[in-house]
Image (cartoon, rainbow, N blue to C red):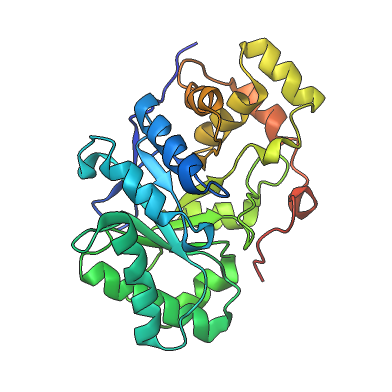
């Protein structure tokens, strides 16, 4: 089988000259030395996209791992996120700036900064977005986007956004739980993003390993000579999403990136598509579109 993608592939962001690596590495719940070590290992095996957040409390470790990797800063794409406003436009901006400095130093930058949750209310979402737009204007981030936004949140932004559409929508929950995998495909928001050129990121496409013994998944893994995790990562890639698998185990970190030497057939993609349970398939909660 021909594999159409490679680990070095990049995806263009809408209305931007920025390109995001097709595969990323997530660091949710990785702290201290474990975070530092796992990021270093991910970079060694070929990942060039690291996804962190203020909520994860490990931006310092990501920044340190990046600086000690020996890689040029321009070769690694770093995403972080802000969860909630700071109480005023200036305070919100300062919260964002703190993250940039933790990751990139005083004169550094991040590649993508996201609003981590849609839960701040209309006024809060506006304040957060305008702070991100300011950061973008100042060159301290290369792109900006959102997370866990449904159609109604996207449409709401049009009233005040200077930058629209958002470059990315990372579909996850306030807890950091991924909700984009075969059992919860959230097709309404995914179709909306596709229509507007918004890149969809899938945090933790491995479904917290809850589905590792699913008969359909196990059968496909055996057919392709891959692990169930590799099937899920590859599925996300072939769907056009940017998956962000997370692990602290060196073997699994490498294995989750070893998905570019095979291709899931159209028939088997359809089988995985058929597992969709809509909102009921989400581990915790799906995005709200109306």
Examine the rendered structure and indicate whether residue 233 appears above or below residue 80: above
Dividing the picture into quarters, in which one does residue 196 lie?
Answer: bottom left
Observer able to see residue 219 = yes
Determine whether, in the image, residue 89 is placed left or right of residue 176. Answer: left
Examine the rendered structure and indicate whether residue 83 appears above or below residue 92: above
Of 36 and 20, which appears nearest the observer? Answer: 36
Determine whether, in the image, residue 49 is placed left or right of residue 56. Answer: left
Of 52 and 260, which appears nearest the observer? Answer: 52
Query: Measured from the top left, where is residue 91 in percent x and y?
Result: 38, 83
Determine whether, in the image, residue 29 is placed left or right of residue 199. Answer: right
Determine whether, in the image, residue 269 is placed left or right of residue 251. Answer: right
Query: Measured from the top left, where is residue 154 in percent x and y?
Result: 51, 69
Dividing the picture into quarters, in which one does residue 142 lie?
Answer: bottom left
Dividing the picture into quarters, in which one does residue 189 lie?
Answer: bottom right
Query: Measured from the top left, where is residue 26 in percent x and y?
Result: 50, 44
Q: Residue at x 55, y 29 (%)?
A: 249
Examine the rendered structure and indicate whether residue 273 appears above or below residue 112: above
Q: Please give the count of numbered marks on the rendered protein.
A: 0
Work out which residue is located at the far bottom of the displayed protein and give it: 88
Observer able to see residue 182 = no
Query: Measured from the top left, where is residue 248 in percent x and y?
Result: 54, 35
Of 88 and 137, which appears nearest the observer? Answer: 88
Q: Residue at x 26, y 44 (%)?
A: 67
Quadrant holding the C terminus: bottom right
Q: Residue at x 48, y 48 (%)?
A: 32
Examine the rendered structure and indicate whether residue 9 appears above or below residue 66: above
């Amino acid at each position: 089988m021909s594999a159409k993608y490679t680990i070095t592939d990049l995806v263009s962001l809408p209305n931007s000259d920025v390109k995001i690596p097709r595969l990323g590495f997530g660091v949710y719940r990785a702290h201290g030395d474990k975070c530092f070590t796992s990021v270093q290992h991910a970079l060694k095996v070929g990942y060039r996209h690291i996804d962190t957040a203020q909520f994860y409390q490990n931006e310092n470790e990501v920044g340190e791992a990046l600086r000690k990797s020996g890689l040029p800063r321009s070769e690694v794409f770093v995403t972080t996120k802000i969860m909630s406003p700071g109480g005023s436009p200036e305070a919100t901006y300062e919260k964002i700036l703190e993250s940039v400095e933790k990751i990139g130093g005083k004169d550094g930058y991040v590649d993508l900064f996201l609003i981590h949750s849609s839960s701040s209310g209309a006024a809060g979402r506006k304040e957060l977005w305008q702070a991100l737009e300011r950061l973008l204007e100042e060159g301290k981030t290369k792109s900006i986007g959102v997370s866990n936004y449904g159609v109604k949140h996207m449409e709401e932004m049009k009233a005040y956004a200077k930058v629209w559409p958002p470059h990315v929508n990372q579909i996850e929950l306030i807890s950091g739980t991924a909700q984009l995998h075969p059992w919860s495909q959230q097709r309404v928001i995914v179709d909306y993003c596709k229509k507007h050129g918004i890149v969809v990121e899938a945090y933790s496409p491995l479904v917290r390993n809850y589905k590792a013994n699913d008969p359909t998944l196990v059968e496909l893994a055996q057919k392709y000579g891959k692990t169930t995790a590799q099937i899920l990562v590859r599925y996300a890639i072939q769907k056009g999403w940017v998956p962000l698998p997370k692990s602290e185990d060196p073997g699994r970190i490498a294995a989750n990136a070893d998905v570019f030497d095979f291709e899931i057939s159209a028939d088997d993609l359809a089988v995985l598509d058929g597992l969709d349970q809509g909102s009921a398939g989400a581990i915790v909660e799906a995005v709200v579109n109306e």
